[in-house]
Amino acid sequence: MGRFKVLAGVLAAVVMGAALSSPAVAAKDPGKERAEVREMSQKVLSKLYSLQPEAKKAIAGSAGYAVFSSVGTKILVVGGGSGKGMAVNRKTGAETFMKMVEVQGGLGIGVKKFQLVWVFTDKAALDKFVNSGWEVGGQATAAAQYEGQGASTQGALSVSPGVWLYQLTDDGLALELTVKGTKYYKDEDLN
């Protein structure tokens, strides 16, 4: 039980450090922050479409989508990260600005920048993501970029009925086998 408490304390410290080092901590104008998230979202979608052109058709036919950019760090068996993004209802055009926080346990080392594009094929799944948040459990990944030869991308993964996920990574090497806990929730300051 003592090991668990130590590991839980280290994980909490890593997540707190990631959150405090995030640009979101600095006081900013909400209008400017929303514009930055929209710009990031468009860049990520453009990158996804160039890497996986079929994703454009999937998003165009969806009930909605969400785009997030995150930075995570991992030192031996603990890690964490945070990010920002937005969800868009394709029918109404409504935007919901969101945050994410991640806690990891498992073997690995390094810093990983990644972008996530969630695709919701039905409105109920989109509404649940936006209104109730979302928690993601275990995941194993191995992705690397060698000498600027382009970003590594995994194909869309079925996360649950009506929900698909694209993950894009860049700027470095990320080799890990982890059990992740990621929480997505509304950004009350931007909505």
Image (cartoon, helix red, strand yellow):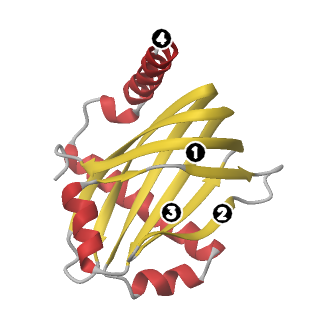
Task: Measure the C-alpha gap from mark 4 to mark 3.
Answer: 42 Å
Front disc: 4 or 3: 4
Task: Measure the C-alpha gap from mark 1 to mark 3.
Answer: 12 Å
Q: Secondary structure at mark 2?
A: strand
Task: Measure the C-alpha gap from mark 2 to mark 4.
Answer: 39 Å
Nearer-N-terminus badge (2/3): 3
The total number of labels drawn is 4
Instruction: Give the camera-side residue of 51 and 165.
Output: 165
- The residue that disc 2 covers is 153
Q: Position of residue 151 (x, y in %)?
A: 69, 58
Q: On the image, which quarter does residue 123 sit in?
A: bottom left
Nearer-N-terminus badge (4/3): 4
- Residue shown at 16% from the left, 53% from the top: 191
Q: Secondary structure at mark 1?
A: strand
Q: Which mark is residue 44?
A: 3
- The residue that disc 4 covers is 2
Nearer-N-terminus badge (4/1): 4
Q: Secondary structure at mark 4?
A: helix
- The residue that disc 1 covers is 113
Q: Position of residue 69 (x, y in %)?
A: 46, 51
Q: Position of residue 108 (x, y in %)?
A: 68, 33
Q: Position of residue 161 (x, y in %)?
A: 39, 75
Q: On the image, which quarter does residue 12 sit in?
A: top left
